[in-house]
Image (tube, rainbow, N blue to C red):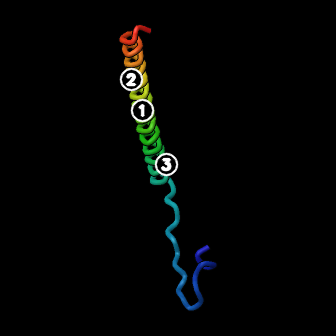
Amino acid sequence: MNQLMNTPGQPVVNTPAQPTGPKRCATMVGDYVRTALILIFWAVVLFASLAAAFVACRAMYWAVVQILRALGG
């Protein structure tokens, strides 16, 4: 792939190989942990935003009820 992308006259740059054995396993575990933490973070963000929306809607409903009561509705 790198050979195809090089311009003529430029040396071929070799990319390091993927680690193998225990090091690759540790890298994969790290990837899984990072992915899990990212998913947990976004789950918390989603839950917090839904909770905030629920509280806001409940407050607006309460305000509308109070206004209707004040108007005698």
| 50 to 22, vertically: above or below | above
Q: Disc 2 to disc 3, how far (Cα)?
A: 41 Å
Q: Which mark is residue 55?
A: 2
* SS of the residue under disc 1: helix
Seen at 49% across and 48% down, the residue is 28
Seen at 41% across and 36% down, the residue is 45
Amino acid on which the number 2 mark rests in the picture: Val
Marked residue nearer the N-terminal end (2 or 3) = 3
Camera-nearest residue between 64 and 23: 64
Q: Disc 3 to disc 1, how far (Cα)?
A: 32 Å
Q: Which mark is residue 49?
A: 1
Query: Picture coordinates of residue 11 (x, y %)?
Result: 53, 86
Image position of 16 (left or right of 72): right
Seen at 49% across and 53% down, the residue is 24
Check disc 3 and report the residue beneath it: 28
Amino acid on which the number 1 mark rests in the picture: Ser
